Amino acid sequence: MKVGITCYPTYGGSGIVATELGLELANRGHEVHFISYANPIRLDPGVPRIHYHEVDVSTYPLFQYPPYCLALASRMAEVADSYGLDLLHVHYAIPHSIAAMLAQQMMAPVRRLPFITTLHGTDITLVGAEPSYFPITRFSIEQSDGVTSISEYLRQRTVDVFGVRREIRVIENFVNCDVYRPDPQKTGAREYAPEGEKLLIHISNFRPVKRVLDCIRILAEAAKRAPAHLLMVGDGPDRGAAEHLARELKVEHRVSFLGKQNHVERLFPLAHVLLLPSELESFGLAALEGMACGVPPVATRVGGVPELVRHGVDGFLEQPGDIAAQAARVVELLRDEALHDRMARESRRSAQERFCSDRIIPQYERYYDEVVNGRAQAA
Ligand code: GMT
């Protein structure tokens, strides 16, 4: 099949899922065309059957806000026409879904161009629920030829918040278990922890919903009872505050802020525990990537996270903001080697048996087939 994929190409779970999906599809013989304003971060150039089409948003003194959505729609229609795309698959409803709908209408005199919208989380729970975006988000969901959601939680939330009656297919996030794999030797960990401290890791876009300050507080508490060092990977609005808090709590020597990293599959395997203290998480892709590397998560019982992490089996779930409880779980995992080994094994097994690309990508392929052949249930 020939698929056009649009996503936010910079850092963020939805762009990562879209990029990994494109790579997996290309690997399975499909032709994939990324259409976006920048090359998606995890997309190395030169991959066979992958094409990248940049959207150029020209400015003009009249445009206080350059009309990206329109430029994107034009490019989508152009690429669809030139390369004979079978469908467009957009990740994150706003504004990608509306751009796809416009491209579809532009192509209508030529042929049918169906589009699928994949909902990732904040497009529904935060942005889409804002009064100014609410009606257009609902409209874009109704107009899509197919809609998928990355967890059952997000599907239900979309139904509850938007009163959507059409089918929303749940296709959970996935991980490539050959790329994300454990390293029992934890080669390279000493670079960050020369005294042999165990490493904790947090990876996110450092937005308030991620509660990154909690990571620093958890580390400070846990380090009183077990030697530990925290890797903070990513960047975003709360990074400065997190660095400040580390100094205030006098643990700055125990925290490494690594900034945005392209090859997180090299960092996860160094860690013993992954921290995901989010206020809300529709899935928690970072936790899945960590689990595939045999790193049990200490996460919060919010949104779709319990669909991924089974409390006491392959990780622990506590309440958001409960630093004492999360720190206590970290200490358990750092001190009790047998417990850690068991959970690390279960994490890996869980990723392999429930969320490996080989299990999930065929679900997208089947859905594409239904949508292209007009068998998916619309509004
Ligand atoms: O919160 C983020 O990291 C960004 C956001 C996005 O759309 O880029 O992530 C959402 O999509 C991810 C991939 O499907 C999910 O794993 C995250 O749970 C989800 N974030 C939230 O729901 C807050």
Image (cartoon, rainbow, N blue to C red):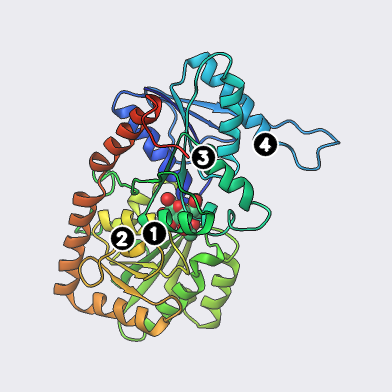
Q: Are marks 2 and 3 in contact (CB under 8 Å)?
A: no
Alpha-carbon neighbours of circle 3 within 10 Å: few (<14), some, or many (≥20)?
Answer: many
Q: Amino acid at mark 1?
A: Tyr
320 relative to 110 in the view: left or right: left
Q: CA distance from mark 1 to mark 3?
A: 22 Å
Q: Give residue 167's quadrant in the image.
A: top left
352 relative to 149 in the view: left or right: left
Q: Which residue is mark 3?
A: 7
Residue found 51% across the figure and 76% down from its top: 246
Q: Which residue is mark 4?
A: 68
Residue found 40% across the figure and 68% down from its top: 302
Does mark 2's beta carbon lie closer than 8 Å to ligand 1?
Answer: no
161 relative to 355 in the view: left or right: right
Q: Amino acid at mark 3?
A: Cys
Q: CA distance from mark 2 to mark 1?
A: 8 Å
| x, y percent for residue 87 | 45, 26
Which of pointers 1 and 3 lies earlier in the amino acid sequence?
A: 3
Which of pointers 2 and 1 lies earlier in the amino acid sequence?
A: 1
Specify whether residue 259 is in view: no
Checking the image for residue 307, the label placed there is 2
Residues 191 and 284: in front is 284
Q: Is residue 278 above or below residue 3?
A: below
